[in-house]
Amino acid sequence: MVELPGSALRIGRGAFPLAVAVALLGVPSPLQPQNWRTVTLSRQAGPERTLDVEVRFGAGRLSIGPAPEGLLYRMELRYDEDGFQPVAEYRGELLKLGLEGVRGGYRWRSQERNEMKLFLSREVPMTLEMEFGAVHGEAEVGGVPLSRLSLATGASDFRLNVSEPNPLRMSAATFRVGAADFEALGLGNLRAERIRVEAGVGSLLLDFQGAWSGETQVSVDMGVGSLKLRFPKGLGVRLQRKTFLTSFEPEGLVKRGDWYYSLDWETAPHRVSISVNGALGSVAVSWVR
């Protein structure tokens, strides 16, 4: 075990101690020497009533899930210390976590081999803002009390899963994806008033299963690619599309004016209205029990 240099970790002031465990891993490359390390950072939950969480990770493998009871967060990192350093800042109601490049480091040579596992509290209401580059990974936020959610990712293969209902009614969820294959599962469990999706090139799957409450407004702006919309039977759906050279498969929907409606729109206990803008590609609707 070796200690993490002070310059490699930034820790804000707080009443609770930050636990840090560091181990040196890996064998240097025969072409370019690399110093691989693993770091575990964690913090006990305290008197926090709300928390703003910002997560940054450039490239590599990533997973996010719920933390054990009593922990505010736990973060496990594996990275090349010559090019990167961990970030764990806690100031007031703001928590910043992730991995950042070191000025002058050879970021390009090893960043795709970086790894991060992050676990977030299910006890503290929070806003969650995540920004990723070229990542392969998934995030499980089921049961995490989220008042707002924002995710931005570049050339990625990423899945967001909401397996349990959000304890809070969320004001808004925003997803910005570049050249990506992106799946969002269980969006009904977010309990969001508004959902906005902006996509460049790739494939999107938006699954609206979950414990619905109230109504949700959804807007999707896509460039080139495929969009799959999956709805649970019994959810009232209204869809409008403004697309160019885009195929459309409106299974289970009937057109009235500029909108497509599910047959139970007027009587459904919960409803979602979706506006789709697209250029090239396809839009397909499917239903599940």
Image (spheres, grey):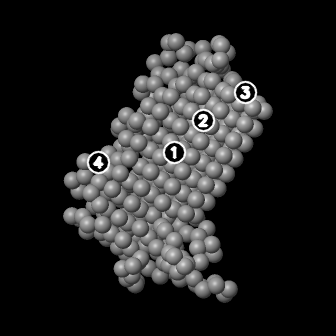
The residue lying toward the viewer, choosing from 285 and 5, is 5
3 or 2: tag closer to the N-terminus: 2
Q: Amino acid at mark 4?
A: Thr
CA–CA distance in space, label 3 to label 1: 25 Å
Of labels 1 and 4, earlier in sequence is 4
Give the amino acid at mark 1.
Asn
* Separation of marks 1 and 4 at Cα, in angstroms: 23 Å
Number of marks in the image?
A: 4
Which residue is pictured at 44% across the width and 34% down the height? 192
Local crowd size for mark 3, using a 10 Å CA cut-off: few (<14), some (14–19), many (≥20): few
Q: Nearer the viewer, mark 3 or mark 1?
A: 3
- Residue contact at pointers 1 and 4, CB within 8 angstroms: no
Where's residue 155, x and y in %?
64, 56
- The numbered disc on residue 220 is 2
The residue that label 3 is drawn on is: 249
Viewer can see residue 210 = no
- Residue 240 is left or right of residue 124, and the answer is right
